[in-house]
Image (tube, rainbow, N blue to C red):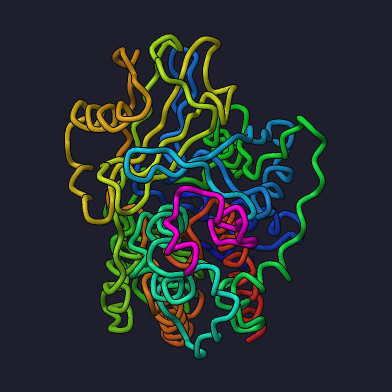
Amino acid sequence: MAEKKQIAIVGGGIAGLTTAYYLQKQIRAYRLDYEVKLFEASSHLGGKIETLKKDGFMIERGPDSFLARKESASRLIYDIGMEKDLVRNNTGQSYILAGKKLHKMPKRAFMGVPTELKPFYQSRLLSTKAKARISVEPMLPKGKEAQDQSMGLFFRRRFGDELVENVLEPLLSGVYAGDIDELSLMATYPKFYEVEQQYGSVIKGLQATMPKPPKQKKGVKPPGAFLSLKNGLESLVEGLEAKLDPGTVQLETSVDHIERKADHYHLLLGNGEVFRADAAVLASPFFAVQRMLSQYDFMEQLKEMKATSVATVAMTFDASAIKKDIDGTGFVISRNSKYRITACTWTHKKWEDTTPEGKVMLRCYVGRPDDSGVVDLSDEEIVQIALKDLNKIMKIKSKPLFSVVSRWKKAMPQYVVGHLKRVADVRANMAIHLPGVFLAGGSYDGIGIPDCIDSGEQAVQNVLAYLREKSFS
């Protein structure tokens, strides 16, 4: 009887876990003679997904939610039987902090880009000159066709500098913890380029393509755009792990090097062992993948990628400590403001089940692209930076009940201009020189939880197609 085909998954973040889960589901459904082994270098699964519970508070140390409109995450949650745990965020006023003042986020916008001009005319966030500048966007000629360009270049050309720096930069590039003038438009928000090319204007294109918001009953808030789980996002990791076959996961086991043999691969593990694999999915950060396959010159392209470091600090208080409460769910900070925090979520309002009655939880993001060294400061220093910035607008009179600082060093891959071509070139070369080895995860196809799940699902299809073809050759 032939031995089972071995499939290796390197990396136990959400992309790797998704790959393992859906592979084993297919193996069971079709009685395939395959076996899956997942190697994770650290002592825990989930990558940046980590939930801390303390004194009745529930603190997300990494992502706190995912976009509801990206359906793969919800589909996975339903698939593993956790749909009853899904919760949607509370909606409320969001703000942009510019100078020393909080401004309401202008309505009728998509990711900060106007779909109607009137709310932007009424906002004090922009100068009269900036309002005049955005009003001519529908009349500007469309840009020349381009394979790629930076977000900053595109939006400055369409709307001018002030809208970019006060609104678009903190919203768009904040998701990637990067520099709007370096991040690739086509790898992050290609829709804006596509509507400009088709309709000649971003505003006209959004008006033509965006679904109209449903009519809301008076006094009823619209549904939130984000979803999470009532027991924290780490419960998704635990739920996935519980669905895997016993013995699938091997923690604290790095993969140091991968060698191609005649019809299989040898994975040289950090513990000195060798794992024989017929196919592999590399769901690790780009720099780890480049190291594993350093003997291939085409992998040098991954060295051109960068990753930034960020930190979050969650601070808990008695409600009485906040002397100037604000009706809203949080704010982002404009590029030109002199703050070291980049955003703040009033978690107790956005996700009320995370915080006990009579308490407050604020979660601040620290670490601009030009101030990444702040991540290396002590916990106390980071807390003091956050409190100093918050006290400029909120008047917090007491020390936190407790605070939790989470550091993510070189954890945010930067999709700089040329990212899509770079990744495509690497994958094309892998298909030739490393058939049966596939990339997945946040370094390549999107950094959000649903994006990573999508990449895991695609990796499953790639592996099964490869092994099926191989069995007939």
Count of picture labels: 0
Nearest the camera: 85 or 472?
85
Residue 261 can be seen in this image? no
Q: Is residue 201 above or below residue 230?
A: below
Q: Residue at x 43, y 17 (%)?
A: 54
Relative side of 225 to 392, left or right? right
Q: Is residue 120 magenta?
A: yes
> Which quarter of the rendering shows the N terminus?
bottom right
Rendering coords of residue 290 (x, y %)? 31, 70
Q: Residue at x 57, y 33 (%)?
A: 235
Provide the residue span drawn in magenta: 109-133
**Res 167 quadrant in image:** bottom left
Nearest the camera: 353 or 5?
353
Rendering coords of residue 14 (x, y %)? 52, 49
Q: Is residue 466 magenta?
A: no
Residue 376 can be seen in this image? yes
> Which quarter of the rendering shows the C terminus?
bottom right
Q: Residue at x 76, y 32 (%)?
A: 220
Relative side of 217 to 463, left or right? right
Q: Is residue 68 above or below residue 29?
A: above
Rendering coords of residue 302 (x, y %)? 32, 73
Which residue is situated farthest in the bottom direction here? 144
**Res 221 quadrant in image:** top right
Relative side of 127 to 190, left or right? left
Nearest the camera: 114 or 57?
114
Relative side of 434 to 226, left or right? left
Nearest the camera: 434 or 345?
345
**Res 320 quadrant in image:** top left
Q: Is residue 102 above or below residue 427?
A: above
Rendering coords of residue 224 (x, y %)? 66, 40
Q: Residue at x 47, y 48 (%)?
A: 124
